[in-house]
Amino acid sequence: MKRREFLVAGAGAGLHSIGGPGKSSQPPGQVRQEQVGERVKIVAFQGKCSNDFDENLDRVLELIEKCGKEKVDFLCFPEGYLSNYSADLAVGLDDPRVKKLLRVSGQFDMVSIVGISEIERDAVLNTALALYRGEILGKYRKTMLTGSDKKEFSSEYSLPVFRAKGITFGIIICHDSSFVEPALTMRWKGARLLFSPHYNSIDSDRMDEHRKKVRSNHIGLATLLQMVVVRSNVVGSEEGKLSYGDSTIFSPLGEVVAAAPLFQETLISAEFERNVFEEEKWAARKEVPAEVIQQLCEVAQSKIPNSGANG
């Protein structure tokens, strides 16, 4: 495998988790026991994506090995990264290359969030896989599809949360971050860490406006929901469109803890004390009166027509 050099910048219902020590079914040579430390190290990759599934897989495997050896706890890749955000490169999860990904990721006590265009029966879904200890801990499918998404992908409305490394976390994908509801639902389910993989390819004349709005959306989610929010994006340019990056890790105060330079392939890294994912300060979700939640549900159901079948 060709080696690459990367800059490192910065410092319930629906719950999926791995069984306790000794209960894993991984083959020999893979991690069998979860390691939980007082500090949690999170890394996000920002980089170019190829229209070659195997090339993207090689880069993912390389970075999993690099970050796994550096005792990273969570590693996030951009939206649809293996498939270049394209239905043309969609595969089923029984594909031998996915099995290879599981074998390599299972060598390290690290959660990897990897985007893929997934074939399931007759549908293609924009999926983020949560991989841990050689298994698919769970998967999240993009909920809020853009107009162009709907031409290629089907949607699914499940909003799961996952648990590993002693932390409950959720995943949203790109356009999901323009709406509070997916992340808010995951927060109610107990998530305190939120991954937000993106594949932004934006017309050059509105790129900066898009960048500012998306960054503000993530600051809002982090602050209002008291979550660590991790955004991972692609970089590049093609036919007048720019993929600018701006990958960032935000604290529950909405502060930028680590940020990638625009248009540069890089890794960003941040460490947090474990209690950041356990304590609630100022406003706790449980403070919201049930009557307020009921009114919210009622008015939302009255304003939004039934979405009908997936897709």
Image (cartoon, rainbow, N blue to C red):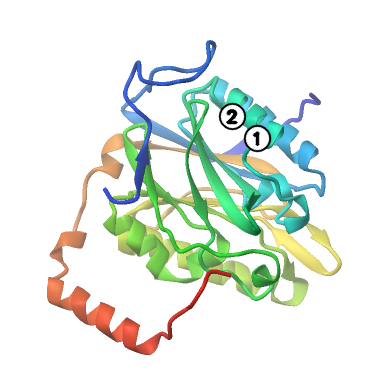
The dot on residue 28 is: none
Instruction: Check if mark 1's residue and mark 2's residue have beta carbons within 8 Å.
Output: yes
Q: Residue furthest top?
A: 28
Residue in the picture at 62% in, 41% down: 93
Q: Is residue 162 left or right of residue 246?
A: left
Nearer to us in this view, 269 or 167 = 167
> Residue 157: percent from the left, percent from the top?
45, 64
Residue in the picture at 72% in, 49% down: 83
Label 1 sits on a secondary structure element that is: helix
Q: Where's the N terminus, which quadrant?
A: top right
- Residue 61 visible in this rendered orientation of the protein: yes
Amino acid carrying mark 1 in the image: Val
**The quarter of the displayed image where residue 295 is located:** bottom left
Q: CA distance from mark 1 to mark 2?
A: 6 Å
> Residue 142: percent from the left, percent from the top?
54, 60
In the picture of the structure, the residue carrying the numbered disc 2 is 102
Residue in the picture at 78% in, 37% down: 54
Label 2 sits on a secondary structure element that is: helix
The dot on residue 98 is: 1
- Above or below 97: residue 46: below
Amino acid carrying mark 2 in the image: Leu
Q: Residue furthest front?
A: 121
